[in-house]
Image: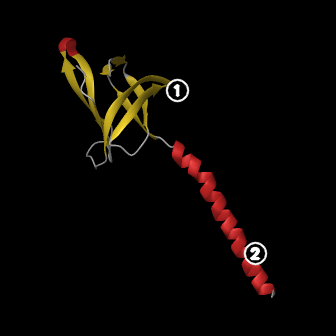
């Protein structure tokens, strides 16, 4: 009888523990954002906003392919723009693809990391 009581108590404890863990971790997973950092070595235009040379945090939500990417620096959002998330292995980590326009201005086209890339919508 004692063995059955211990077994039932143990099973009850485990089921309550697993239920608690699943309930507590679910909201955290829903709030997760993908983030990366990128260093621009020269000023670059992103969605009509000129970003100075420096390190920026990029964040986006969702599995893709279409995502909204936010560029921030020192916890301040500077610009949010649409991009296509491409999940495939790449040769470079933090490679930036730009297009040069009149006056030697650089417009961001894509950023590639080891396992993913963000391809930005063309800007005129």
Mark seen at residue 67: none
In the rendered view, would you say 33 is above or below 2? above
Q: Determine the CA span between mark 1 and mark 2.
A: 48 Å
Observer-nearest residue: 3 or 99?
Answer: 3
Q: Which color mode does the image show?
A: secondary structure
Q: Secondary structure at mark 1?
A: loop
Q: Secondary structure at mark 2?
A: helix
- Mark with earlier residue (1, 2): 2
In the drawing, does residue 46 fall left or right of residue 14? left
* Residue 96 on image: x %, y %: 28, 32
* Residue 26 on image: x %, y %: 57, 51
Residue 46 lies in quadrant: top left
- Tell me if mark 1 has few (under 14), some (14-19) or many (20+) residues whose alpha carbon lies within 10 angstroms of its own: few
Mark seen at residue 9: 2
* Residue 52 on image: x %, y %: 37, 18
In the rendered view, would you say 114 is above or below 102? below
**Residue that mark 1 sits on:** 75
Residue 74 visible, this angle: no
- Tell me if mark 2 has few (under 14), some (14-19) or many (20+) residues whose alpha carbon lies within 10 angstroms of its own: few
Quarter of the figure that contains the C terminus: top left
Quarter of the figure that contains the N terminus: bottom right
Residue lying at 72% horizontally and 80% vertically, measured from the top left? 7
Residue 51 lies in quadrant: top left
Residue lying at 58% horizontally and 47% vertically, measured from the top left? 27
Residue 92 visible, this angle: yes
In the drawing, does residue 95 fall left or right of residue 21? left
In the drawing, does residue 110 fall left or right of residue 29? left
């Amino acid at each position: 009888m004692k063995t059955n009581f211990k077994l039932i108590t143990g099973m009850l404890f485990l089921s309550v523990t697993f239920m608690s863990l699943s309930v507590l971790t679910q909201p955290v997973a829903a709030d997760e954002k993908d983030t990366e950092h990128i260093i621009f070595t020269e000023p670059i235009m992103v969605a009509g906003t000129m970003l100075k040379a420096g390190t920026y945090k990029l964040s986006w939500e969702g599995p893709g392919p279409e995502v909204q990417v936010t560029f921030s620096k020192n916890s301040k959002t500077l610009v949010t723009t649409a991009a296509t998330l491409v999940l495939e292995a790449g040769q470079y980590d933090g490679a930036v693809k730009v297009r040069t326009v009149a006056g030697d201005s650089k417009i961001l086209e894509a950023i590639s990391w080891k396992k993913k890339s963000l391809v930005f919508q063309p800007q005129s």
